[in-house]
Structure formats: structure tokens, C-alpha cells
Image (cartoon, helix red, strand yellow):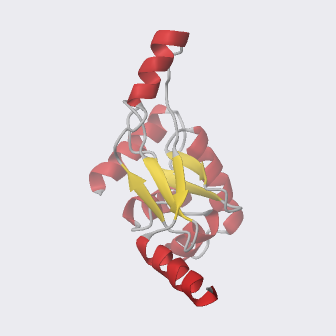
Amino acid sequence: MNIMMKRMKDKIKDKKCKMTSQRQVILRAFVESDIRHMNAEEVFEIVKKMSPDIGLATVYRTLDLFTEMDLLKKLDFDDGCSRYELNDRDNEGHFHHHLICMGCGKVWECQDDLLETLESILQKRLHFHTVDHQLKVYGYCEECEKKREAEQGEHE
């Protein structure tokens, strides 16, 4: 965790940006949280426990700044709110993919790069060099699928 904080602080310094105490608290919330994909309100709830003087507006501004600086990745899971996750890669390779349960809303990460073949085809056929991609797979987790099957059984 300390290594991650140092890496992120170094990135901020490299971008010639000041590491204020508020920014440090918000960054720490991401590094220390068990929740990988947080919206601004979730970040705010964590942050206000550590530093009650930080307001929601500061959290929003800092999330925007960290996204611009590529410290965070802004995600849209089509649920009406933006989520953020720590961008802990160093511009090497691709990010992970997301599996999104349409029942409970839980998000899982899939580390396998499932689009390497497609990227290779795009490069060969269209001379298109892919820098990054995002894949979102929607469905139902095991628990929600069981609930759905049970509800369908009741309606028959």
C-alpha cells in the first residue's frame, strides 16, 4: 500500500501538481479501500471519516483532476453514476475488463485480455494501432441468476 501511495505521489509530482493534504486523503481512500469501483459519494463517505473538513465539492474536483492526470480511471457502467478506480498501470498493456451483474449491481474484474486477437486483426487489416480498450460484460451473478430462475418458476 505504501508503495502504491508513493507511486501515485510521484506521478502527481511529475505532473508539476501540488500534493495538498486533501488530495492525499482522497488518494489514500482509493489505495486503502476494499471497494475497487467507487462513485464520488462513496469516496466522500470514506474521506469524511479521515478528514471531516473535506467537502463533497472538493472530492468531485479532485476526482476530475486525478482523472485528467491519469491517476484514476473514470468508468461508466450504465447505472447513472460515474465510478472511479485507481489507475495502477504504467501505460503498459491494457486495463482489465468488467463483469457487471444486472441484478445486484456488483462488478467483478476480469484480468484476462480477451481482445488481443481482435486488436491483432485490426492492426493487420485496417492498420489501426489500439492503445487501450474497455470491455463491459452484462449479465447475472450466480446468486442473482438463482433468484431469477426461482421467480420464473413461481410465475409458471
- Indicate the quadrant containing the N terminus: top left, top right, bottom left or bottom right: bottom left
Q: Residue at x 63, y 87 (%)?
A: 155
How many numbered marks does the figure carry? 0
Q: Residue at x 41, y 35 (%)?
A: 94
Residue 26 rendering spot, x and y as whole percentages: 52, 60
Q: Residue at x 41, y 67 (%)?
A: 33
User: In the rendered view, would you say 18 is above or below 120?
Assistant: below
User: In the rendered view, would you say 84 is above or below 150?
Assistant: above
Instruction: Single out the residue that lies furthest toward the front.
Output: 156
- Indicate the quadrant containing the C terminus: top left, top right, bottom left or bottom right: bottom right
User: In the rendered view, would you say 94 is above or below 149?
Assistant: above
Residue 120 rendering spot, x and y as whole percentages: 42, 20
Q: Residue at x 55, y 74 (%)?
A: 104
User: In the rendered view, would you say 48 is above or below 135?
Assistant: below
Q: Nearer the viewer, residue 6 or 1?
A: 1
Residue 119 rendering spot, x and y as whole percentages: 45, 24
Residue 110 rendering spot, x and y as whole percentages: 38, 51
Q: Nearer the viewer, residue 107 or 125?
A: 125
Instruction: Single out the residue that lies furthest toward the bottom.
Output: 154
